[in-house]
């Protein structure tokens, strides 16, 4: 029971209070923020969540193994970066090749988003935050899943805002990226009001 | 005729487009996490720009040289792993700036390996029918300079008005806006700079077009 509680608390924290997009700017790039329909955003978010979750599942035991070796203390941090990237690449390759071989219909839709959703700052960042905070196995998984869901919700919010802004009379220079960044900035201010302090990087 | 001349001018400016007209941060909206989160002081911005250049230039060159021989799904993995190895190799280069720079940049150092500018340029230059290596090198260098300029501009402003220092040296200011040190102001400042860049770009384009049309009217046969 405690394990489930721990998982849910960390996941909810990652979705709301430590939202990857609004509090750390992770995953925020023009390509992701300008996805043209909720369906594409959901597909992107599902891929991102899946890749982050399974990569964390692989990387956590290996990171623990690295941590146990005291002799590697100085370079351990840098080895952790490489470890995270190797796990991410492995999950990406498995997902890409398996869907291509056995689920061609899913692969057709997935191939449009799988590159940017897998090699994403939100995926790498959330894993590294979990490791640097020395989270346990369950907490790491909760944080990874929460980050993916948080990103998806943030993109959906941005999409909705963009839809409404399209009906407003925005100055020409602010149309597109600038007004979207202002919108995210105001959201970020609201989240900052909830947290009330600077997050660890 | 006027459009042809405009196109010709654009072709000349192609060599430097990564710095201003297609600035990766302000115009393209790529690499935003860095512009928003780590630009609280100038040292962070310079350190990250060094790592960015050290990673981007060799990786784009690699993409340009090997892209034709690798399938697309494999190439992205190869470039990301190569970029991460370069990130690790370039960390000692930023240590002289400040001993605690690594801690202050935190997770933003490794995510340079998966930044959107790198992915865009690698995908562009790994295509089979795309242009030569020299253009890849030019783009990598100009995008690095553009990224550095954007980050330094935001960081200088945030440090100067936010904490009353510049490169760690305190300066006298009548007003201090400590809110500039928080993440949301990074979004808002980037938005204003982006709008300003768009305005200037459009203004220059209009100016060129008007000058060309006036010139064409003056030389038109009667």
Image (spheres, coloured by chain):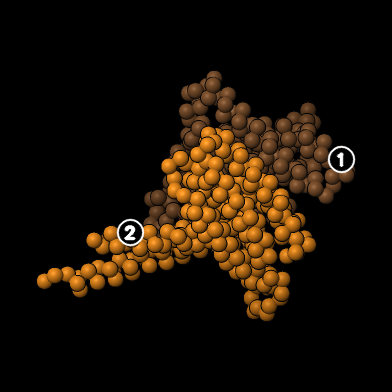
Q: Going by the picture, which residue comes out furthest to the top?
A: A102
Is residue B88 toward the left or the right of residue B59 in the image?
right
Q: Is residue A81 left or right of residue A112?
A: right
Label 2, secondary structure: give it: helix
What colour has chain B?
orange
Quadrant housing residue A59: top right
Label disc, if present, on residue B7 of the rendered structure: 2
List x then y, in percent, for residue A166: 40, 50
> Which colour denotes chain A?
brown
Q: CA distance from mark 1 to mark 2?
A: 60 Å
Q: Using a 10 Å C-alpha cutoff, classify the residue at mark 1 as few (fewer than 14 neighbours), some (14 to 19) or many (20 or more).
A: few
Residue at left 29%, top 71%? B211
Pointer 1: what residue? A69
Residue A200 visible in the snapshot: yes
| B172 over B54 or under it: above or below | below
Query: Which of the chains bears the disc numbered 2?
Result: B
- Rendered view: B172 above or below B204: below
């Amino acid at each position: 029971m405690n394990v489930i509680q721990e998982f849910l608390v960390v996941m909810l924290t990652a979705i709301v209070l430590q939202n990857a997009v609004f509090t750390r700017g992770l995953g925020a790039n023009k390509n992701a923020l300008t996805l043209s329909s909720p369906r594409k955003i959901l597909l992107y978010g599902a891929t991102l969540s899946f890749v982050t979750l399974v990569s964390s599942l692989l990387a956590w035991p290996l990171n623990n193994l690295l941590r146990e070796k005291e002799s590697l203390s100085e370079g351990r941090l840098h080895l952790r970066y490489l470890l995270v990237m190797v796990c991410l690449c492995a999950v990406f390759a498995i997902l890409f090749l398996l869907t291509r071989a056995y689920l061609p219909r899913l692969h057709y839709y997935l191939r449009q988003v799988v590159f940017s959703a897998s090699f994403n700052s939100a995926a790498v960042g959330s894993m590294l935050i979990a490791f640097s905070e020395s989270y346990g196995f369950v907490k790491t998984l909760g944080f990874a899943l929460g980050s993916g869901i948080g990103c998806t919700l943030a993109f959906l919010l941005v999409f909705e805002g963009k839809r409404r802004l399209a009906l407003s009379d925005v100055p020409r220079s602010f149309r597109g990226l600038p007004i979207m960044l202002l919108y995210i900035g105001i959201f970020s201010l609201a989240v900052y009001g909830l947290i009330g302090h600077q997050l660890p990087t | 005729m006027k459009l042809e001349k405009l196109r010709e001018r654009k072709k000349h400016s192609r060599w430097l487009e990564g710095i201003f007209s297609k600035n990766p941060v302000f115009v393209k909206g790529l690499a935003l996490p860095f512009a928003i989160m780590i630009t609280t002081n100038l040292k962070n911005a310079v350190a990250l720009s060094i790592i960015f250049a050290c990673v981007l230039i060799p990786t784009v060159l690699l993409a340009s040289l090997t892209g034709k021989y690798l399938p697309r799904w494999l190439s992205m993995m190869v470039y990301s792993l190569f970029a991460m190895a370069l990130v690790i190799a370039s960390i000692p280069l930023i240590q002289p700036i400040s001993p605690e720079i690594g801690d202050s940049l935190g997770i933003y150092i490794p995510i340079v390996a998966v930044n959107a500018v790198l992915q865009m340029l690698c995908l562009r230059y790994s295509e089979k029918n795309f242009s030569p290596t020299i253009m890849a090198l030019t783009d990598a260098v100009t995008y690095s300079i553009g990224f550095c300029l954007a980050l330094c501009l935001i960081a200088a402003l945030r440090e100067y008005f936010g904490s009353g220092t510049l490169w760690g040296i305190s300066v006298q200011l009548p007003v201090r806006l400590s809110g500039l040190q928080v993440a949301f102001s990074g979004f808002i400042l980037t938005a204003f700079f982006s709008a300003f860049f768009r305005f200037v770009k459009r203004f220059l384009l209009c100016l060129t077009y008007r000058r060309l049309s006036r010139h064409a009217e003056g030389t038109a046969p009667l």
